[in-house]
Image (cartoon, helix red, strand yellow):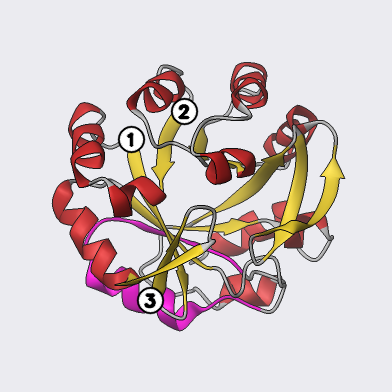
Amino acid sequence: MIIIPAIDIKDGRVVRLTQGRMDEETVYSESPVDVARKWKAAGAEIIHLVDLDGAMAGNAKNFGVMRSIIEEVDIPIQIGGGIRAGDTADKYLSFESVKRIIIGTAAFEDEKFVKHLFEKYPGRVAVGIDAKDGFVAIKGWITVTDMSAIELAIKVEKLGAAYIIYTDISRDGMLTGPNVKATKELAAAVSIPVIASGGISSIKDIESYKGTPVEGIIVGKALYAGKVDLKEAIETVKGF
């Protein structure tokens, strides 16, 4: 199991949202590159980048910032937010250090597109499944669908997804603890790796994933708020 620090970008700055609400942001840095360097220095094996503006608009609004991080920080990256067209996927995956891209809304809306990506880039396309009360939320978490998170997970695995990144949006940015039960249930329903996201507020929360079939844990607001030390978190999961 690995710890994956998150960098969420809105208007070119590093922010954290509360339950994904774009009008409830806290700005933590004007320099995403500096933040990425900080997480690398702390021992991160991979960084989770999200283009929040892109998630709302459906395209790569912060591509220039993402490219700067990719080019200037020598560490593997996974990127999500607004990747709903082939040219955006191609641009990101042309960088060797981009380990994988994350498809969210498109995985729900466009089966043909995501299947094409899975086939074109085997092992490098993850599906981000964001859920509220167990149901898939799309378009920057604005729209909650009638499809369960587990149903979508099983579907995209059959289509060829390499990873699933599962977020309980009711916990995201709240520092109230993760939904370990729901994450375990989803991970048990598929055979591809699952990465957990949302709600981590302490080292104890990270320890709650010990013994679960989860490959990684994304940590966001807890790092920026000083609730979790990245080096300590990385050391914690080495014994899992």
Q: How many angstroms separate mark 1 from mark 2 (CA)?
A: 8 Å
Q: Position of residue 55 (x, y in %)?
A: 54, 44
In this orientation, which residue lies closer to the viewer: 226 or 151?
151
Instruction: Identify the residue at horizontal 67%, vertical 43% (top origin).
Output: 7
User: What secondary structure is found at the residue carrying circle 2?
Assistant: strand
Q: Return the residue nearer the eye: 44 or 133.
A: 133
Magenta highlight range: 177-198
- State the CA–CA distance, disc 2 to disc 3: 27 Å
Please state which amino acid type lies under the numbered disc 3: Lys
Q: Mark 3 and mark 1 in contact? Answer it, CB < 8 Å.
A: no
Residue drawn 65% across the image and 23% down it = 73
Residue at 64%, 49% (x, y): give it.
5
Relative to 49, does residue 171 appear above or below in the rendering?
below
**Magenta stretch: residue 228 in it?**
no
Mark nearer the N terminus (3 vs 1): 1
Q: Position of residue 69 (x, y in %)?
A: 65, 25
Residue nearest the viewer, comparing 218 with 125: 125
- Residue receiving disc 2: 98
Q: What residue sits right under mark 1 in the picture?
A: 124
Q: Which residue is mark 3?
A: 184
Q: Earlier in the sequence, mark 1 or mark 2?
A: 2
SS at mark 1 in the image: loop
Q: Amino acid at mark 2?
A: Val
Mark 3 surroundings within 10 Å by alpha-carbon count, few (fewer than 14), some (14 through 19), many (20 or more):
some
Does residue 55 appear to the left or right of 14 in the view shown? left
Residue 210 makes an appearance in the image: yes
Work out whether residue 47 can be spotted: no
Count of numbered circles in the view: 3
Check residue 197 for magenta coloring.
Answer: yes
- Give the image location of residue 6, x and y in percent: 64, 48
How crowded is the residue under tag 2: few (<14 C-alpha within 10 Å), some, or many (20+)? some
